[in-house]
Image (cartoon, rainbow, N blue to C red):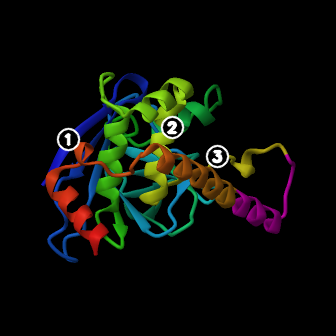
Amino acid sequence: MDAANPVQHGSEAVAYHIPTVPSAGDTSPLKTTIALPRRSAWTSGLHFHATHTEYLRLVKGAVFVELNGKTKLISALVGGEVDASTGQQIQEGLVIEIPRYARHNWGRLDHYISLTRQGRSPQPIWPEDWTEEVVVEESTDPSDISKPLFFWNLNGIITAPSDTIFCMRQRVAKGFLGDLWIDLQLFVVFWELDNWPIFIDFRKLPLGVRPSWALRMGEGAEIVTSFIVLCVARVFGILLGLRAVEQRRTPDALWEAYWKSARD
């Protein structure tokens, strides 16, 4: 079972269908479905995972997937990767494997085109589904409850009502941090549930042509930066009593599974 959980509207519109109960076994991996309506500019943001291999399965529409500095354009209607110039299929397959520590980002194909090809001519002929609703299934190996916990608690923080009750030290921190209060809570979630944002994209710095070893060093620096930033956030989170997973943000069955695993 899962539940629909719309998070944002307008240009950043996205809806999640997130499992509410743990997997019944290894034969039925947990899957989170992400839907992006037409004209949504939502992207996952450049990030990596340290303890999970991730799989993205395109069910509907067309997307771009940036993986370790290379970008693939994939159409469900075509059945795989399409050429950026002709829109023709160059490789079959709608499942993208994202290894541990692989920096990646994905979103709608039309959003990618608007950012990279605006004003260029001639315009290629894109697949017919390039402006349709996008539906993507996310799963991980190992298939555990980390991904559902991540999405339930991330969404719970973002959509928390303004009258949410916090303890005194958290209210003081919220008043002091302003908009960064939400970021701090999210960083606590990111640390525990294996979602590591790239804060500095070294590939986009204006440093000219760089050899492969320099790119590898840059990517290593990105990883170190992510660990440092989230570690600092985790320390502040501990001092403020912030938790990555809270019962009020988590369905009962997932909460019970999480609490049981924390005690074991």
Question: Residue 204 lies in what quarter of the image?
Answer: top right
Q: Nearer the viewer, mark 1 or mark 3?
A: 3
Q: Residues within 10 Å of mark 1 (few under 14, many from 20)?
A: few
Asked whether, in this view, residue 64 is left or right of residue 71, the answer is left
Q: Is residue 147 left or right of residue 210?
A: left
Q: Residue at x 42, y 25 (%)?
A: 11
Q: Are marks 1 and 2 in contact (CB under 8 Å)?
A: no
Which residue carries the number 3 mark?
A: 199
**Secondary element at tag 2:** helix
Q: Is residue 132 left or right of residue 46?
A: left
Mark found first going from the N terminus, 1 or 3: 1
Magenta segment boundaries in residue numbering: 207-221
Question: According to the image, label 2 marks what residue?
Answer: 183
Is residue 87 in view?
no
Q: Please identify, in this view, whether the residue under mark 1 or under mark 2 is nearer the observer.
A: 2
Mark number for residue 4? 1
